[in-house]
Amino acid sequence: MTLVSLPSPIAWPGLLGHTVGSPALSTVATLDASGEYMAYVFVAREDMVVSHVGFRAGTSTGSPTCEVRIETLDATGLPSGTLWATNTNGTTGTVSSNTNVLQALTASASITKGQAFSVMVKYATGTSQIIQQVNNAASPLGSSLPYQVVNAGTPTKGNMGGAVSTFVLGSSSTTFYQVPGAYPFTGTNTSAFNNTNGARRGLRFTIPMNCRAIGMRWWNSSSVGDYNAVLFSDAGSELSSSSTAFDGDITAASANTPCTVYFDNTVTLTAGTTYRLVIEPTSATNATLLAITLPSADHRSATPLGLIGHYTTFASAAWDDTATSSVPYMDLLIDQVDNGAGTGGVTGVIGG
């Protein structure tokens, strides 16, 4: 294994992006009349065969149903009204309030890498249906592509601001694509905890590449408890004396944005090996770790982490790895990766 230095560290898997506030579900559209819809326009990053479309439903009134559609785009970049292919649509049953809906298409949509397409939830029947997004989740995606289109009478483009879509695209009911700007949220869990029973919270993950870790980014909300930032083996042994103590007051505590911290010592990680990236409170004052809650463990495949990680907790000398449908808001900071050649490399300036 030959590691080469990167010009600046990368944050893996990139869950935090550049968040600007506390992530929360919010209304992006209310569908209450024929022809109204909420759509997102994406460019496929891989070849896709989409058989299922999911979305987060807010308040539902009058027993609504919705049609989900994969459509082509017109010359102005709006959904064209034409299905991507024959029967690339499906209609839900009655939608309940505050649920994640996953609807099969009558026929799958085959989309080639690099093609632009629209994913739509359209009013079908009932009184009204709120479609939700997640605010403050990925502000870099506030650019011009991907983007959203809301038709509440007139179709109108809009950038995604600091939000992500709750849409999900599946090749089956249990296997999902990672679509930029879209996470299948059901909500978030903000876990405040202190050093009672030696509590720890964090990310259990299997690293997909050889690399060197130098620190982490994590979501601490407004808590000010002192803590250690640690990398453990899966069995719970501290690696490379990485445990680093931090004073919880050294933060803009009311900002509700990520903390970036560094280990005392770097840690070399081996591809295919499972580790634990952990926050460990050192006092009776709370620290806080925010986690994304998903509709099921299968939906992790739609997040940047994929199926190779999930939320983990520790108390009273035992790890609990049962929260497999939850992903903590944490990124590992990596400054070296395997060059894949077994020799040499280029050393750059490491920033932070």
Image: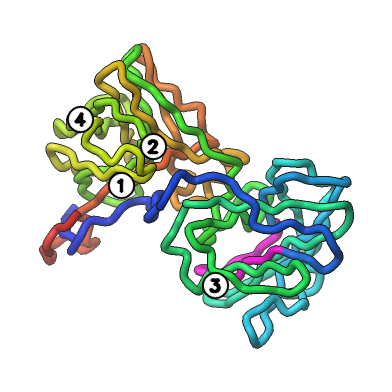
Between 264 and 212, the residue placed more toward the observer is 264
The Cα–Cα distance between marks 1 and 4, rounded to whole angstroms, is 32 Å
Numbered range of the magenta stretch: 38-52
Query: Marks 2 and 1: CB-CB under 8 Å?
Result: no
Query: Marks 2 and 4: CB-CB under 8 Å?
Result: no
Q: Eyeballing the image, is 242 above or below 101? A: above
Q: Eyeballing the image, is 78 above or below 97? A: below
Chief secondary structure of the magenta span?
strand
Disc 3, SS: strand
Q: Residue at x 58, y 46 (%)?
A: 25
Q: Quadrant of residue 297?
A: top right
The Cα–Cα distance between marks 1 and 3, rounded to whole angstroms, is 30 Å
- Mark 1 sits on what residue? 271
Is 42 magenta? The answer is yes
Amino acid on which the number 2 mark rests in the picture: Ser
Q: Residue at x 35, y 36 (%)?
A: 220
Residue farthest to the front, as pictured = 254
The Cα–Cα distance between marks 2 and 3, rounded to whole angstroms, is 33 Å
List x then y, in percent, for residue 69. 74, 65
- Mark 3 sits on what residue? 43
List x then y, in percent, for residue 231. 25, 34
The Cα–Cα distance between marks 2 and 1, rounded to whole angstroms, is 32 Å
Q: Earlier in the sequence, mark 1 or mark 3?
A: 3
Other-residue count near label 3 (Cα within 10 Å), few / some / many at <14 / 14–19 / ≥20: some
Between 160 and 99, the residue placed more toward the observer is 160
Query: Marks 1 and 4: CB-CB under 8 Å?
Result: no
- Mark 4 sits on what residue? 247
Amino acid on which the number 1 mark rests in the picture: Ala
Is 44 magenta? The answer is yes
